[in-house]
Image: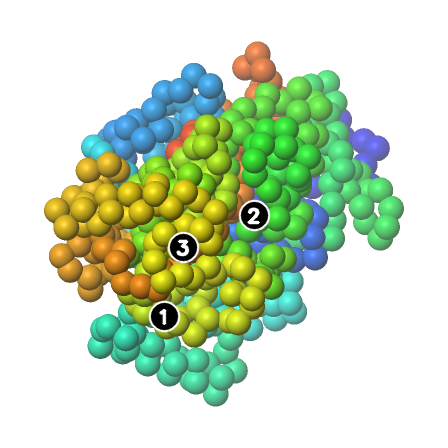
Amino acid sequence: MAMSGFDEIVDFLVVGSGGGSMCAGLVLRDAGKSVLILEKSALVGGTTAKSGGVMWIPGNPFLKRDGIQDSAEKALSYLDNVVGNASDAPGATRERREAYVRQAPRMVEFLVSKGIRLTRVSQWPDYYDERAGALKQGRTVIAELFDINELGPWKAKLRPGFMPVPATLEEAFQIPWMRKSWASKKVIGRVILRAIRAKLTGKQYVSAGAALQGRMLQAALKAGVELRTESPVDELLIDDGRAVGVVTIRQGKPWRVGARLGVLVNAGGFARNQELRDRYQPGTRADWSNAIETDTGGMILEMARHGAALAQMEEMVGYQTTIPPGQEAADIKPPAQSLTAKPHAILVDQSGVRYQNEGGSYMQYCRNMLARNRTVPAIPSWAIFDRSYIANYMLAGTMPGKNKPAAWTERNYLRQAGSIAELAARIDVPAEALCATIDRFNGFVDQGRDTDFHRGERAYDDWLGDPFHAPSKSLGRIDQGPFYAVPVVPGDVGTFGGVVTDIHARVLRADGSVIKGLYATGVSTASVMGRAYPGAGSSIGPSFTWGYVAALHAAGL
């Protein structure tokens, strides 16, 4: 293949530095190929870096290490039961699911062989753990804590994570229970001592997604992967039906980069593009998203311009959110994932009616909100809870206790009343309906079973609940005034649709033919998980895996 007319030529080119980009770079460098990653923003790591940094990996080596039985057959059975075979979700064909289940653990083993220190969370149940093939322990893989000072000058270019303390995710899960558990107090003591030692020894530990992407960045740089920040890609270069390079910006001028083996697009979705959201996801808002500011969908549209098929564009990784005054523009919006999954709390629509299991998958939770809103106003919905909740659980990032910021009540975010009927008036829902809803829910609590929506019947529901609350970890009466309400909206951590790819991560046209030399991964693609989210890390795991797969194919391995 002739390569001419370029300002620069490399073997493999990656657009975007999120999950999977540096993994692909490591594979190609291992094969002796040159790799260039072009990042639009000034920071490396994408939304992955500011996330929990969790990968959902069936059959991962850490399950085996810990004596937990898993298999490709079991994982595939689970995906069959959760993802299904929707003909309108071409990113999630069974062939692709089979490839994912087979390649994901190999990808993890490859990273470990490159010195990436990974492990698992001991208990993070699959989100539909009542279905065949699920693991109640979960299939999550995370990175160990990382000292970002090891990055040297690149430290300032790693996108910051969401957790400011040097705690692992497993330790962070224990912090809210410090008033109830000596074990949690010991965890907090351990984190404090670690922070003190780090300060004395000149270390700066990061956790979660920042740790994962920090470790990946360190390994990529060591392997000779070249990364350039502030290098947006505006155009794919296609020659005779094959992707041969891109046009980026260098030193303020257009710069044509050729790629001998191919181009991998991992440039995110369109969570921050309100125009595209209005087209594909009406009722959702860009300013509710936790995706990074550059997640605007430009490369999805550019691939579509060259004939790439688009699918599943109406899907997002919903992440229910409540936004207090002053946090409207926050980089990380306060999650409401566990708010209404805790005892003494429920979610109701604007008619005062409860309409779903408040536990379970956050993606399903937000899909239910959007579906409900098509027939009954439900955006925002209202989290309803009582004094017992306020006393025992965190709310919008604040610790348990009734002393909340004054602005919350002054600006009508946190509504409070002495009775349920008065609270109904405060949130403008019919008092009779809300009182009936609360009475019905309290009856379920008394009988120990949520007959309407089966909350508390899954291990994941209980995991989101209170391990110290008896007899149910998830269900608790709402009967201790004062009573409270806060609005909940269908936020997200990213969109879940994009270009259709095959089992080699190659981009496909609508007729199923391959755009040669063009690969894609992450939320630039129609997800292999289709319209569901089987477990924690169901976007980052595939992003890494398909980046790995694309690199293997491009290198001919």
Residue 105 locus on image (x, y percent): 35, 42
Q: Residue at x 58, y 54 (%)?
A: 45
| Residue positioned most to the top | 511
Q: Are marks 1 and 2 in contact (CB under 8 Å)?
A: no
For marks 1 and 2, give the CA distance.
26 Å
Tell me, for residue 545, which label it has, or none: none
Question: N-terminal of the two: label 2 or label 3?
Answer: 2
Q: In this view of the protein, which residue sits in the foreground, 174 or 101?
A: 174
Is the residue 26 above or below the residue 386 in the image? above
For label 3, the crowd category at 10 Å Cα-Cα, with few meaning under 14, some 14 to 19 and many 20 or more, is: many
Q: Which residue is mark 2?
A: 289
Give the number of callouts: 3
Q: Which residue is mark 1?
A: 400
Secondary element at tag 2: loop
Tell me, for residue 423, which label it has, or none: 3
Quadrant (top left, top right, bottom left, bottom right) of the N terminus: top right
Question: N-terminal of the two: label 3 or label 1?
Answer: 1
Answer left or right for 146 relative to 185: right
Is the residue 81 above or below the residue 449 in the image? above
For marks 2 and 3, give the CA distance.
29 Å
| Amino acid type, mark 2 | Ser
Residue 324 locus on image (x, y percent): 53, 60
Q: Residue at x 76, y 34 (%)?
A: 235
